[in-house]
Image: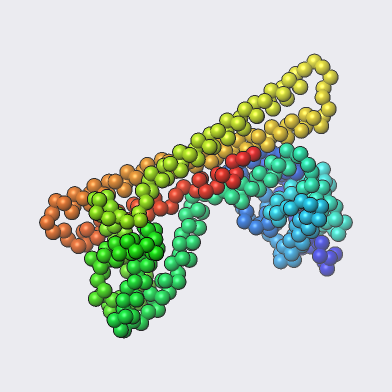
């Protein structure tokens, strides 16, 4: 048995025992429970469904797997997707993994928790899952697909901002590397290095395109006011870490200068009115989701009414299969409602967050105007700090709420 590739957990023959106690809380194969966001762990790869570790409020994990077990799980999932594909149904590996786990958790399938899976067990498991995935007009299968799709597309604000930062850093990396490695000596080489710094400032701030001449000229003028080209020699002598720190500071200061000038009507070429854009996006998204929610609720009320009439009717009861189909359809609608309300909550939170950031942005602007206009000479350190604060206030608006990016693909039932 130890050499059998289908002996998934040869070192732990009671690998199912740890999870069956909480199976009722899971979206199991036949239980068809509506699963909330708080009680599910998002996954990014099929095998993660089977990996160990804590899960919020409910256990969806097998014991921690060995490399051998992970390989077997991948083989099972691959066999299921290939067999479904051969029968004309394209199934993602994540959905296949979801159904595999639900099938194992279902007591009706009678997988023995006291021993490892044999070759016959695996054959039965694959057949059960393929049959399940090839069902037509199955509300319960549609519910599982919806849950997988939502989990694969939905992300928290923190996750979205982290990914946004990663993409931005990847775009900055080539020009940043050229700046850090530069050993300019001649006039032409210094001018080239300075242009690269201008490009870095533009890319890092997101205030306009480096390919637009007017934007580049305005950014160059702002950079020259705080970092003239004559200071490049000192910059080149810095360590790599100090260079990066100075580049970030220059980007914030230059961005603050351009934003201030834009508000004063003296510049701001290529800078979008981001608060207005975000407010419009939130409004449109909110309206679309509200319409979808109303349609879902209306359908759920109709299903509920039919079920109540069937159970309270003095006439002979309908076939159990009809009642089960109605219940599965109602569960599907309620699951959809749960996801829609999650998005609506995100939109409300995003709108409140946007109002707070806009107020902070405007407050910083008024403070900077008061500082600049009330004095004939302003200390450089004081105004630079104000520009940096101003730039950071605007930078928080550059990372938009995640809802508009994911709602279009997951709000449809």
Q: Residue at x 87, y 56 (%)?
A: 120
- On screen, residue 237 above or below 35: below
Query: In the orientation shown, which residue stands out farthest toward the top?
Result: 314
Q: How is the image coloured?
A: rainbow
Instruction: Note whether 384 is above or below 133 in the view shown.
Output: below
User: Image point 19% across, 49% down: which residue?
Assistant: 370
Nearer to the camera, 291 or 72:
291
Left or right of residue 114, residue 386 in this image? left
Q: Quadrant of residue 223?
A: bottom left
Image quadrant occupied by the C terminus:
top right
For the view shown, which residue lies furthest in the front direction? 213
Percent position of residue 406, x then y: 55, 47
- Residue 137 pos. (x, y %): 76, 39
Q: Which residue appears at 51% of the width and 45% of the height?
A: 403
Q: Is residue 50 visible?
A: no
Residue 374 in the image: state x and y as whole percent.
14, 51
Q: Residue furthest bottom?
A: 185
Residue 379 lies in quadrant: bottom left
Relative to 158, 253 lies left or right: left
Residue 175 position (above or below residue 76)? below
The picture places residue 64, in percent across and down from the top left corner, at 68, 59
**Closer to the camera in the image, 60 or 193:** 193
Q: Is residue 212 left or right of residue 76?
A: left
Circle count: 0
Q: Residue at x 86, y 59 (%)?
A: 119
> Residue lying farthest left?
376
Q: Is residue 270 visible?
A: yes
Image quadrant in which the N terminus is located: bottom right
Q: Is residue 164 left or right of residue 337?
A: left
């Amino acid at each position: 048995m130890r050499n059998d590739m289908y002996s998934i957990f040869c070192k732990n023959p009671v690998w199912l025992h740890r999870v069956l106690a909480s199976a009722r809380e899971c979206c199991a194969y036949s239980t068809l429970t509506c699963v909330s966001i708080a009680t599910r762990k998002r996954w990014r790869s099929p095998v993660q469904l089977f990996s160990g570790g804590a899960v919020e409020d409910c256990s969806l994990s097998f014991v921690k797997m060995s490399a051998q077990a992970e390989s077997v799980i991948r083989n099972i999932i691959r066999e299921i997707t290939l067999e479904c594909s051969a029968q004309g149904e394209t199934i993602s590996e994540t959905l296949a993994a979801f159904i595999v786990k639900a099938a194992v958790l279902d007591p009706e399938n009678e997988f023995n928790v006291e021993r490892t899976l044999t070759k016959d067990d695996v054959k039965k498991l694959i057949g059960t899952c393929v049959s399940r995935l090839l069902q037509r007009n199955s509300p319960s299968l549609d519910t599982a697909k919806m849950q997988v799709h939502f989990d694969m597309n939905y992300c928290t604000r923190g996750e979205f901002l982290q990914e946004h930062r990663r993409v931005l850093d990847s775009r900055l990396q080539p020009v940043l590397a050229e700046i850090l490695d530069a050993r300019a000596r001649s006039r032409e080489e210094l001018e080239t290095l300075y242009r690269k710094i201008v490009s870095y400032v533009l890319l890092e701030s997101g205030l306009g395109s480096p390919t637009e001449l007017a934007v580049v000229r305005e950014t160059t003028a702002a950079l020259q006011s705080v970092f003239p080209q004559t200071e490049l020699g000192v910059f080149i002598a810095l360590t790599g870490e100090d260079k990066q720190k100075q580049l970030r500071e220059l980007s914030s200061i230059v961005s603050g200068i351009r934003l201030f000038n834009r508000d004063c009507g003296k510049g701001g070429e290529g800078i979008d009115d981001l608060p207005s854009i975000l407010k419009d996006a939130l409004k449109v998204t909110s309206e679309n989701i509200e319409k979808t929610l109303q349609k879902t609720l209306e359908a759920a009320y109709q299903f509920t009414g039919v079920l109540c009439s069937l159970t309270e009717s003095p006439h002979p009861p309908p076939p159990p299969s009809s009642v089960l189909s109605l219940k599965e359809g109602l569960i599907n609608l309620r699951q959809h409602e749960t996801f829609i309300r999650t998005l609506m909550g995100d939109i409300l939170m995003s709108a409140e967050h946007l109002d707070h950031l806009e107020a902070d942005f405007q407050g910083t602007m008024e403070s900077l105007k008061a500082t600049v206009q009330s004095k004939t000479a302003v200390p450089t350190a004081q105004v630079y700090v104000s520009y940096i604060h101003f730039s950071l206030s605007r930078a928080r608006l550059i990372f938009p709420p995640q809802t508009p990016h994911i709602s279009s693909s997951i709000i449809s039932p």
